[in-house]
């Protein structure tokens, strides 16, 4: 059903409560490229506590596709789907590839992830070393050589955080005349930034 074209973009599908996996499975079964990022969380059932995979962004699934009228109708037939985010079928709101790439990279790294309030203020940084090299986000909390890197999906106004080594980050926006050097062995604060 789904055909990949060079016009394919990432879109957000809003699902009914607890229907993210159902929507994901139906779409992938129909040949669409769907992405449902998950985080490990604790669950207690019958007095047994264990970790389970929960949606990173509850109520949402990402879809990579060039959406025309025919594809839009096919996608809307998915059980558990509320709608595709945007004004109408021909004015859907895409998600930046860089935001999805960052989330995909986080999912592959075995680091503790946690939901985090959506932020727009703070220092935008890029990781320059390690498994997450090139991932950009907002650095919000700093301990000696430790910080939280927050990756956001602007359209959803949701974020996820991962602990990073502050010696492996550098600011994304730097003066064009200066050479950018990563912060090394310094503690810094975002207060007053």
Image: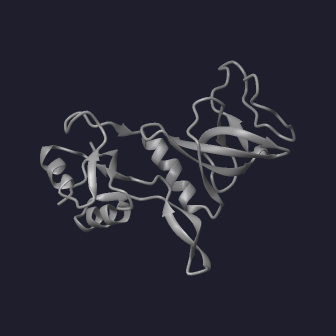
Residue at figure coordinates x 67%, y 25% from the top left: 174
Q: In screen coordinates, is 51 left or right of 123?
A: left
Q: Is residue 150 above or below residue 1?
A: above
Compare residues 154 and 16 and report the one nearer the observer. 16
- Farthest residue in the front direction? 46
Compare residues 171 and 53 and report the one nearer the observer. 53
The colour style of the image is one colour
Question: Count of labels shown?
Answer: 0
The percent coordinates of residue 170 (x first, y second) are 71, 36
The percent coordinates of residue 144 (x first, y second) are 86, 45
The percent coordinates of residue 37 (x first, y second) are 47, 58
Residue at figure coordinates x 48%, y 38% from the top left: 157
- Farthest residue in the left direction? 70
Residue at figure coordinates x 27%, y 55% from the top left: 81
Q: Is residue 147 above or below residue 45?
A: above
Q: Quadrant of residue 3?
A: bottom left
- Farthest residue in the top direction? 177
The percent coordinates of residue 5 (x first, y second) are 24, 48
Quadrant of the image containing the N terminus:
bottom left
Q: Is residue 8 above or below residue 124?
A: below
Residue at figure coordinates x 61%, y 80% from the top left: 47
Q: In screen coordinates, is 150 left or right of 8?
A: right
Quadrant of the image containing the C terminus:
top right
Q: Quadrant of residue 150?
A: top right
Compare residues 158 and 33 and report the one nearer the observer. 158
Q: In screen coordinates, is 180 left or right of 61?
A: right
Q: In screen coordinates, is 100 left or right of 87?
A: right
């Amino acid at each position: 059903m789904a055909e990949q074209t060079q016009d394919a973009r990432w879109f957000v599908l809003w699902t009914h409560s607890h229907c993210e996996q159902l929507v994901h499975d139906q779409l992938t079964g129909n040949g669409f490229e769907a992405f449902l990022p998950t985080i490990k969380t604790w669950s207690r059932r019958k007095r047994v506590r264990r970790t389970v995979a929960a949606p990173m962004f509850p109520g949402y699934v990402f879809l990579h596709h060039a959406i025309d009228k025919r594809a839009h109708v096919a996608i809307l037939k998915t059980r558990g789907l509320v709608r595709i985010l945007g004004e109408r079928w021909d004015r859907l709101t895409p998600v930046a590839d860089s935001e999805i790439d960052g989330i995909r990279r986080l999912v592959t790294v075995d680091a503790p992830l946690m939901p985090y309030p959506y932020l727009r203020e703070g220092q935008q940084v890029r990781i320059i070393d390690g498994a997450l090299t090139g991932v950009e986000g907002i650095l919000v909390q700093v301990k000696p050589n430790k910080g939280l890197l927050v990756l956001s999906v602007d359209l959803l106004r949701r974020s996820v955080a991962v602990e990073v080594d502050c010696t492996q980050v550098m600011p994304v926006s730097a003066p064009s005349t200066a050479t950018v050097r990563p912060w090394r062995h310094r503690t810094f604060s975002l207060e007053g930034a």
